[in-house]
Image: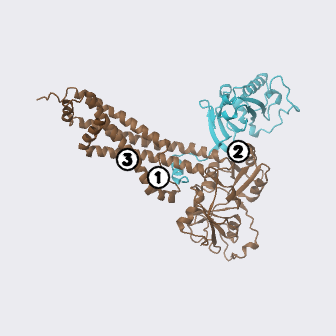
Chain colours: A cyan, B brown
Amino acid sequence: MFPGRWLLALALAAGLPLAGPVQAAGPHVHGIGKLDVIAEGESVVLRLESPLENLVGFERAPRTDGERQAVRRMAAALRAETAFVPTREARCRVASVKLESPVIASELLAEPGTKPAGEPQAAHGGQPTAGHAELVGDYVFQCANPSALRGLEVGLFDSLKGLERLEVQVVGPRGQSGAKLTRKSRRISW
Amino acid sequence: VTQLLVLAIKSGWNRRVSLGLTLAAIALSVALLLGIERLRTEARRGFAESISGVDLVVGARGSPLQLMLYAVFRLGEATNNMSWASAEALARHPQVAWTVPLSLGDSHRGFPVLGTTGEYFERFRYGDRRALKLSSGRRFEALFDAVLGAEVAEHLGYRLGHHLTLAHGSGTLAALEHGDKPFRVCGILARTGTPVDRTVHVSLQAIEAIHLDWQGGAPIPGLSIAAELVTKFDLTPRAVTAVLVGLKSRAAVFAVQRQVNQHPGEPLVAVLPGLALDELWRVIGVAERSLQLVSAMVVGVGLAGLVAVIMATLNERRRELAILRSVGARPTDVFLLLTIEGAVVTIAGASLGLALVNASALVVGPLAQAHFGLALRWALPGIGELKLLAAVTTIGTLASLLPGYRAYRVSLADGMSPRL
């Protein structure tokens, strides 16, 4: 009953790579973002990790007004209600969104009209490896009807043209699953 | 219609050889289609049921899938070991509820030997969170105790108290036996249908003990530590293959995964088993789909053969059809007669194919189980198989409309007025 070597042989014969990059520690590939989803009880917790390149087109502190505008646009896109939409019937509301990047000042990433709490972050303080830098977004949703929660639709692809693929890891009520989302398939279910 | 059915069968009986061969072709092709579907679902179920209730599998940095395949399914290439210090650090992590270390590498007559802790028997879950059960005996307590999986005990005919020696590595080199330190069977596990059945379980300390007088993968010449004396040594394991991890809160899984992946001491990888399986399905999916496609095409060929045979006999049957018409059969009846003939052959072929799959599962099943650990069972068709059967019979019946229509057109006048 346990899987046969034949399956493995088949996979190998088909010339398919067995090494999945999905869980490798911190790969930085332009075009590809990573999304971790935890659906437990009434809450859905998301963590988006993406090279900044996918989101604003550069991976350093913004230097011109145009680049600062681009960062603000990105922050607005990431905070938009359509960015991540859990099953509508579950009536989920965004409880918090936190965007962070080691190379971008937190004021630029904060919600417009609010002062970010805490000390102003050193914009150039992080340690981007080999000239690369990422952005991490932490999202928390609270759902009024969690029993209807079956999945999540990602609308980010519309607003962020540099994002081509999202490697998704889900821990849901029925266990762990994985998926790759693209512009064409933007829905994960669990 | 019942009369037509009887008529169709009786008429078909007159052409039993050609129809019988077509029937055999359809039956074989359907058996192939169903057999592949069954292999596919059984293999998936086997994989999915082999591990349950484990949040993370941690091992040395490498391919997550390779780690899963080796540590959990005992398939594929061996992975690097991780240090015992890392395993202990992991066990002390505040978010970690339990850990079960796994140490692989030795074997007994082709069956893998797993070194682990007693907690394995409490924490390991398979299928729908079912725990391991001993069918006889007890867990290992003494140093050289071994607990056998059901398949190992059955295949080798071992009972409680039986003595066995472990082979170093895969067991092909007879010289590398741990012959000086025999194990005693202290327990036999109930059958699980997972790789556990094919595994010999011993304690981590025992694995360490049999390698005490070994170095660099071979016995140290001139040095032999007697089995009675090994307890005098420090039997703390130095390395393990992988660690199964259960977390206090499932929600912490990604945080712990990140921490493990960035473990400062040594490069580690934390794998979410469910995800690694999804990855595996994606990899295997391509091969599966091509197999399915090929078998579907074989069924297509079978059905095309059926239509061809019925069409080909139309000419020989002009007289038969004419007689039917002369005794009052309407052209629609002729149409139905031929369609029914095709449908009956298809349905009979599909049923025969199903029977064939089950029969071969009975015959080949035990062999596949022993050689590949793949269970092929006599079983009622699953939803996937039923869908395939329905598709085959529908397509077969629809295809039979063709000779029916042809006969309908022809029999309007043909044969009633013999041309001289």
Mark 1: which secondary structure?
Answer: loop
Q: What residue is disc 3 on?
A: B352
Q: Is circle 2 on the same chain as circle 1? A: no
| Residue B307 appearing in the image | no
Quarter of the figure that contains the C terminus of chain B? top left
3D distance between C-alphas at marks 3 and 2:
52 Å
Q: What residue is disc 1 on?
A: B378
Callout count: 3
3D distance between C-alphas at marks 3 and 1:
14 Å
Frontmost residue, B101 versus B75: B101
Frontmost residue, B380 versus A61: B380
Mark 2: which secondary structure?
Answer: loop
Q: Amino acid at mark 3?
A: Leu
Frontmost residue, A114 versus B392: B392
Viewer-nearest of discs 3 and 2: 3
Q: Amino acid at mark 2?
A: Ala
Which is nearer the N-term, disc 3 or disc 1?
3
Q: Amino acid at mark 1?
A: Trp
